[in-house]
Amino acid sequence: LLTSTGSTLTNPPANFYRTADDMNDCVETISQVFLGARLQCAKCHNHPFERWTQDNYYGMGAFFNRIQRKKTQRADELFVYVARSGEVTQPRTQQQMKPWLPGEGDVENPDEIDRRRTFAAWLTKPDNPFFGKIEVNRIWGHLLGRGIVDPVDDFRDTNPPSNAALLDSLAKDFAENGYDRKHIVRTILNSRTYQASFRPNEFNEEDVRFFSHYQPRLLSAEQLLDAICHVTDLNETFGSLPPGTKATQLPAPDLVNNDFLK
């Protein structure tokens, strides 16, 4: 995904750079999705409450500033490619920034063909302190309704995990098994925590943070629509998608014009 190039029609991962359409969007989106860090404040100044600095922001930007996008003759197609040159200047100090990695500092010899490869290799190292934790936390939040860190993409010193040892253990297991999402989903589903009753007792009835009992959740709009269709034996259609397509099978609700899902 992060190192994708080419046509957004024939290479779907390249659409990531349709959404993250400039260096700033890349830094802010990638840091939040893959590191659990919200760096928006560091764009203009050092973060007032967290560890991130303006140098960090533009140092990360040096991995992604060479990404270029151009329209083609085909409708709705962008072609994503990497320029051969281009550096990032820190706007406050006017210093040319070297690519920078959290916890490691400046990268002296990044992959000059595509600096994103250096970032992706660091991100997926088994001992990376960010990626494994945010991924298992996101999966945990999806399955149990709340992350061990919540919100699931807001890791910071002032928002500590409700169970740091659990998060560390899941992240370690995830990395040791090749970042296999099916493995970590199976691990969570087989846990006593996931299988706990939703009925509280007198000791945990007010707990909403420590997973002492299961928290009932509302159905999503997609789940509710599928349930209504099943009960009424009426099929919903979604534009040009094949008949019988379920709402929960839609890659994104905004791809179809459906009033129920708005």
Image: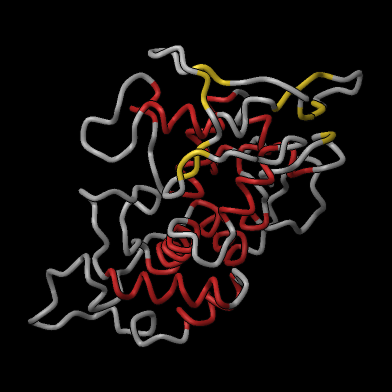
Pick whichever, 143 or 261, lies toward us. 143
Q: Which of 138 and 49 is in front in this view?
A: 49
Q: In this view, does 30 lie above or below 218?
A: above
Q: Which residue is drawn at 22% across and 30% down?
A: 48
Q: Foreground: 133 or 185? A: 133
Q: Is residue 93 above or below residue 80?
A: above
Q: In this view, does 191 lie to the left or right of 46?
A: right
Determine whether, in the image, residue 126 is placed left or right of residue 201: right
Please state if 222 lies on the left or on the right of 148 as rendered.
right
Rendered location of residue 246, percent (x, y): 68, 58
| Numbered marks: total | 0
Q: Which of the 4 image quadrants contains residue 243?
A: bottom right
Identify which residue is drawn at 59% across, 59% down: 124
126 lies above or below 109:
below
The quarter of the displayed image where residue 119 is located: top right
Task: Check the image and name the residue furthest to the left.
Answer: 202
At x 22%, y 71%, the residue is 210
The x, y position of residue 6, in whole percent, is 84, 35
Give the image location of residue 139, x and y in percent.
Answer: 48, 64
Question: Could you tell me which residue is drawn at 26 percent across and 74 percent down?
Answer: 211
- Percent coordinates x, y for residue 161 in the rendering: 27, 62
